[in-house]
Amino acid sequence: MQAVPRPVIALPARPLAGAAAAALAVLAISSAGAAPHGPTGASTTPSSSPVRFLVKGDWGTGSSAQAAISRRMCASHAARPAAFILTTGDNFYAPDGTATPGSFDRPEACLLAAGLPWRATWGNHDVGGTSTATRLSSPRRWYSFARGPLRVVVLDGNQPASRAQLSFLRRTLARATEPVRVVSIHQPVYTAGLHAPSRTEQRLMAPLFRRYGVSLVLSGHNHAYERIVTGGVTYIVSGGGGAALYPCVRVPRGLARCRPEHHFLEVDASATSLVVRAVRRNGSTLESVRVPVRTPAAASAQTG
């Protein structure tokens, strides 16, 4: 039997003040019957063409770390063009949910100038305003889109028990023809971080991820980089986009890595390969990992 590597956990040098601030009350905004993002959910590139995209979460604070991550993302895009930016939520803070020149226009200037499309997830801080809808072009709280071999499903972790959302998730994954399926949801299904994992997502969503061949689930909420592999699915928390960092405080089953560092992700997807690189604000590699591409047939065999 192959030895399982011990998880790598790094704790901050000093405690984080105010890290456990109370989350906003969830707005009762229904997305029942939400259509795919944009005019259609169809892919705009041939299914055989690899797709590259960038990911960041918990970022819109106006901090120097946010600006540094944005500049590094621009350098990444200049070196190897990306198709879009996917956020894992908590896009705008102070005021929550509202983009300002200090939290968006100035620190994100180079990305805005590059014209990269945004594909945003709604975090708990985002429901206090409308800028995720108006500035990041994500008016729906859950939606799906395709690009080449990639199907991305964006979910609302503020409403994990919504019957309409669960029906949408099941229907979208069951009908997907793309070989690579990625899910983004702000509150993590599994995590080593300060905020506890969502037991509701574990109970209602994780079985669907396993059954329908989801390869990668991206989240934020905990301000760190984490990688957990469980049930054949890789879960990555990417919440290091600019907000103050959170410590690693628990060791869930399947934990491979937890680092409280500012970072973003470069994701390269082809029909047979999914490679994720976590990049620090100085451009060095925090981690680079190849994520197995799961098929629904293989997923069914695994879940028995």
Image (cartoon, rainbow, N blue to C red):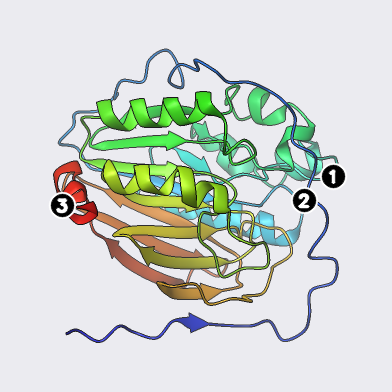
Q: Which x, y percent locates residue 299? A: 21, 49
Question: Marks 2/1: CA distance?
Answer: 9 Å
Instruction: Identify the residue at image location x=60%, y=58%.
Output: 239
Alpha carbon of mark 2 to alpha carbon of mark 3: how far? 47 Å
Tag 3 secondary structure: helix
The amino acid beneath tag 2 is Gly
User: Badge 2: few (under 14), some or many (20 or more) residues near its Cα, within 10 Å?
Assistant: many
Q: Is residue 74 visible?
A: no
Q: Label 2: which residue?
A: 62
**Residue at image location 30% in from the left, 20% down from the top:** 42
Tell me: residue 213, above or below residue 259: above
Q: Amino acid at mark 1?
A: Ala
Q: Are marks 2 and 1 in contact (CB under 8 Å)?
A: yes
Q: Which element carries disc 1, helix, strand or loop?
A: loop
Which amino acid is tagged 3? Ala
- Quarter of the picture containing the N terminus is bottom left
Q: Earlier in the sequence, mark 2 or mark 1?
A: 2
Q: Is residue 165 left or right of residue 145?
A: right
How far across and down, in percent of the image, does residue 125 sit?
A: 74, 43
Q: Quadrant of residue 296?
A: top left
Report the front residue among 63 and 90: 90
Kindly identify which residue carries mark 3: 301
Residue 196 in picture, x, y percent from top left? 64, 62
Residue on which disc 1 sits: 94
